[in-house]
Image: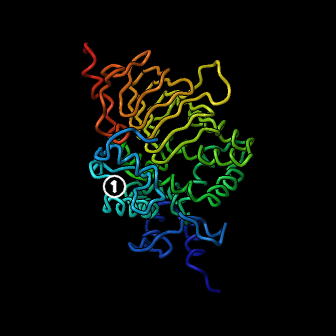
Amino acid sequence: MSMTPLVFSHLLYRHSPPLFLPKLLSSSPIFSLPSNSMATCVDTSRTDTPQLSRDPNRSQNDSFHHYMKYCREPSFPDHVSCKPSLKKQTNNIHTATVVQDFKDEEENIWVKMQGEAKLDLEKEPILSSYYYSSILSHRSLAGALANHISIKLSNSGLPSTTLFDILLGVLVENSEIIVAVKDDLMAVKERDPACISYIHCFLNFKGFLACQAHRIAHKLWTQGRKILALLIQNRVSEVFSVDIHPGAKIGRGILLDHATGLVIGETAVIGDNVSILHNVTLGGTGKMSGDRHPKIGDGVLIGAGTCILGNIKIGDGAKIGAGSVVLKEVPPRTTAVGNPARLIGGKENPVKLDKIPSLTMDHTSHISDWSDYVI
C-alpha cells in the first residue's frame, strides 16, 4: 500500500526520538521552503476558500502630516496603508519603494517564521517537538496562532481543543485579523531591540500574544458573543497579566512592550502604530458611564507606569513620559510628562516632535532637557 509523504513523515516523527526531527524536516518536501512560493494563510482543512491574508492642522510639506494622512486612507491606491514603518523609511514614508517593501515583508512573514524555526532547531534540537507542534506542523499563520494561544489559555476545565476551534473559526472568517497580526509582528521586530526574530516574538512575547487574543475576543464581542469574549479576556488576564476589555478597539502595528500590568478599558480606542510600555492604564475617572475611556491617536508612545484617565484624546504622534498621570487632552506631536502631566514647552507653545515617537521609541528627548536635576 502506498503512503503519502505527509503520513510517512508523521509516522517517523511519532516513532523516532525528537533529535531526528531536524533531519526529517530538512529532507522532507512537505517542509521545504521554496523561495518563490507562499504558504496559504488559512488551514485548508477548515475551508476550501483561500483567505488572506484625524488630521493635524499641518502644511502639506510636513512629513509627519503626510504619514498620518496617508496612513489613514489605505483605500487610495497610491497611499501607504497603516503598516509598521521601518527605520530606513522614516524620512520617505509614502514612496513607491516603501509600499513594495511593506508588501514583500508582510507576504513573506509566515515563510520566514518557518525558516527561522529550522535555524533554531539546528542550534537547539532538543526543542524539536515544541517547534514542530507550534510552527512546522501548521499550514498557515492562522492555524499556528490559534493553536499556540489555545494552549496558553487552556486549563483543566477549558480544553485547548475547544479554544482552538473557537479561535481558528474567528481567524478563518476574518482575514483582516491576520493582516493585523502580521503588522504587529513587524512592529515588534522593528521597534524592540530584545526581539531577535519573528518566531521569537510569536512564541515568547506575551504582549504580542495578549494583543492577538484580544483581537479575536473583540470580534466575538462585536458579534454579540460576549460570554466567549469575556472568557478569553479573563484567561488572558490570568495568564499574561494583561487586562484588555473585549470592547476596546485597537489598531494595527501595535507594540505592547513587556505588557505586564497593562489595563485597557471597554470604550478605549487605540490607533495604528502605537507603542505602549508595561503598567499602563487607559481607564475611566470612576464617575462616568458610557463612553468613558481614552482615545489614543496614531503613532503615540506611552511610557511605563502611565495612567491616562477619562474620555480624553491623545493626539497623533504624541509622547507620554513614564509615570505620568494624564487627565486632559494632549495635542498632536507634543510631549506630556508628570503628575499631573504638563506639556513640554508649556501649554501655549509646546515643543513639537519632528519624528513619530512610537517608531523611534525615544522616551527621553525633550524630557531630559526639561528636567533640572540628574540622579
Q: Quadrant of the C terminus?
A: top left
* Image spot of residue 135 (x, y percent): 51, 59
Of 9 and 342, which appears nearest the observer?
342
Of 58 and 42, which appears nearest the observer?
58
* Residue bearing mark 1: 94
* Image spot of residue 361 (x, y percent): 34, 37
Residue occupying image coordinates x 43% and y 31%: 302
Q: Quadrant of the N terminus?
A: bottom right
Element under disc 1: loop
Residue occupying image coordinates x 47% and y 26%: 329
Q: Tell me where residue 152 sits by quadrant.
A: top right
Eyeballing the image, is 4 above or below 147?
A: below
Residue 160 seen anywhere in this rendered image of the structure: yes
Residue 238 seen anywhere in this rendered image of the structure: no
Left or right: where does residue 119 sit relative to residue 158?
Answer: left
Eyeballing the image, is 165 above or below 69?
A: below
Eyeballing the image, is 74 above or below 260?
A: below
Left or right: where does residue 130 sit relative to residue 121?
Answer: right
Instruction: Identify residue type, mark 1.
Output: His
* Image spot of residue 110 (x, y percent): 46, 61
Of 363 and 299, which appears nearest the observer?
299
Specify how the rendered protein is coloured. rainbow
